[in-house]
């Protein structure tokens, strides 16, 4: 009986340790760390996610939040992602808005549409892909024939639009 009790106690202790360790890894340093500048926040994001290349677009600060659009590169594949920069007391925080998406690859290109939500709960529609022509237009949730931004270096189009509140 004493051996069973000891084995059960050891199992519970091991499970507690594993749970604590895995919970610690869920929250990266990015979730709590402030930076002195946007550049410093971006450099640290590049260290955390090694595929990040450049910031190709950004919004203005609205209610101390700013959306940035960045490129990633994995081998010959190119993609885009978004992050939210928040500003508080002259300090900056970087939050990834989910995983980036590959849009240019050897097997073919793709267009993406996704809804992102900032830490304050503001929602945006994000459109990205490979441009079909220099004066192309896209259709969004609220408009037709919207002219997206085209990054010539990466040959990627992108467009960020606030989601209308009901």
Image: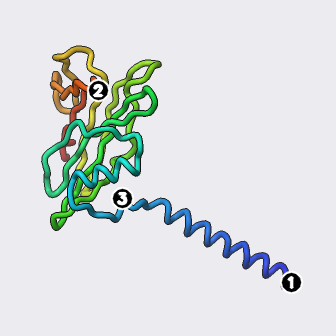
| Disc nearer the start of the sequence (3/2) | 3
Q: Is residue 1 left or right of residue 139?
A: right
Q: Is residue 69 left or right of residue 31?
A: left
**Marks 1 and 3: which is nearer the front?**
3
Which secondary structure lies at badge 1?
loop
Q: Position of residue 1 (x, y in %)?
A: 86, 83
C-alpha separation, residue under disc 3 versus residue under disc 2:
27 Å
C-alpha separation, residue under disc 1 versus residue under disc 3:
47 Å
- Does the residue at mark 1 contact the one at mark 3 (Cβ under 8 Å)? no
Considering depth in this image, is 90 or 47 the residue closer to the camera? 47
Above or below residue 39? Residue 138 is above
Q: Which mark is residue 154?
A: 2
| Disc nearer the start of the sequence (2/1) | 1
**Marks 2 and 1: which is nearer the front?**
2
Q: Is residue 36 left or right of residue 74?
A: left
| Disc nearer the start of the sequence (1/3) | 1
Q: Position of residue 10 (x, y in %)?
A: 73, 76
- In this view, the residue farthest toward the top is 133
Above or below residue 131? Residue 74 is below
Sort mark 3 into few (<14), some (14-19) or many (20+) by Cα contacts within 10 Å: some
- Does the residue at mark 2 contact the one at mark 1 (Cβ under 8 Å)? no
Residue at position x 67%, y 75% in the image? 13
Which secondary structure lies at badge 3?
helix
Residue at position x 16%, y 67% in the image? 89
Rendering quarter of residue 94:
bottom left
Residue at position x 19%, y 60% in the image? 87
Which secondary structure lies at badge 2?
loop
Considering depth in this image, is 55 or 131 the residue closer to the camera? 55
Q: Which mark is residue 1?
A: 1
Q: Which residue is mark 3?
A: 30
């Amino acid at each position: 009986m004493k051996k069973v009790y000891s084995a059960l106690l050891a199992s519970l202790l091991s499970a507690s340790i594993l749970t604590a360790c895995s919970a610690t890894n869920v929250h990266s340093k990015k979730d709590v760390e402030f930076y002195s500048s946007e550049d410093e926040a971006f450099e640290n994001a590049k260290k955390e996610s090694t595929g990040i290349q450049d910031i190709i677009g950004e919004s203005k600060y609205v209610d101390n939040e700013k959306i940035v659009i960045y490129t990633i590169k994995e081998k010959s594949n190119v993609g885009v992602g978004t992050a939210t920069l928040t500003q508080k007391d002259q300090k900056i925080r970087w939050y990834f808005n989910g995983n980036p998406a590959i849009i240019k690859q050897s097997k073919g290109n793709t267009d993406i549409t996704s809804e992102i939500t900032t830490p304050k709960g503001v929602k945006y529609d994000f459109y990205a892909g490979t441009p079909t022509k220099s004066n192309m237009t896209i259709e969004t949730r609220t408009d037709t024939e919207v002219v997206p931004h085209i990054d010539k270096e990466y040959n990627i189009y992108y467009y960020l639009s606030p989601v209308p509140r009901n």
